[in-house]
Amino acid sequence: MEISALAGASAPSGKPLTGAYAGQDVGKEAFLKLLVTQLQNQSPLDPASNEEFLAQLAQFSALENSDAMNERLSEMAQSQQMAQGAGLIGQRVHYLDRASGETLPGVVGSVELVRGEVLLDVGGSKVALSDVVRVDGAALSE
């Protein structure tokens, strides 16, 4: 669940949110800044209701949960890609060579994770898993 533009949040005057945050996805740091600013600048004669603050805190909690879930999903996707790469060890593959634009064959020797990207060692070349366009199966014994 993604919370965008703090739907339902109001500026201290009670007007809809405008300016730098309007129409944008707001991160938790910006959300907290906005909440603290709203608390500091509310009118003592017309303070915001408890329900408004509870709703904003609920939105903040949902935002944090969403961030945590996105992080876990990214980790799971990376693990799944590593497993895919490991399954290709010893397999003959064809991959797109980014430098020449050609499709080249080779046998996967190892797999590594470099800066979040799964790389295969195919005949001494580092090949991104996403560049593999065909898998022939087990390499022939020579």
Image (tube, helix red, strand yellow):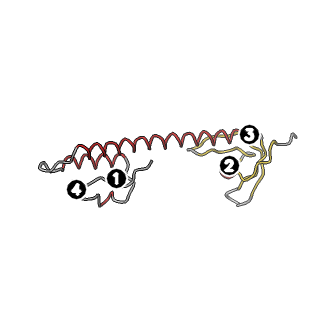
Residue type marked 3: Ile
Image quarter in which the C terminus is found:
top right
* Upstream in sequence: badge 1 or badge 4: 1
Q: CA distance from mark 1 to mark 3?
A: 47 Å
Residue 127 is labelled as 2
**Depth check: 1 or 141 in front?**
1
Residue 46 is labelled as none
**Which residue sits furthest left?**
45
Q: Residues within 10 Å of mark 4 (few under 14, many from 20)?
A: few
Residue type marked 4: Gly
* Upstream in sequence: badge 4 or badge 3: 4
Q: CA distance from mark 4 to mark 3?
A: 61 Å
Q: Residues within 10 Å of mark 3 (few under 14, many from 20)?
A: many
Disc 3 marks which residue?
A: 89
Disc 4 marks which residue?
A: 14
Residue type marked 2: Val
Q: Secondary structure at mark 3?
A: loop
Q: Say which residue appears at 13% left-offset and 48% top-offset.
A: 44
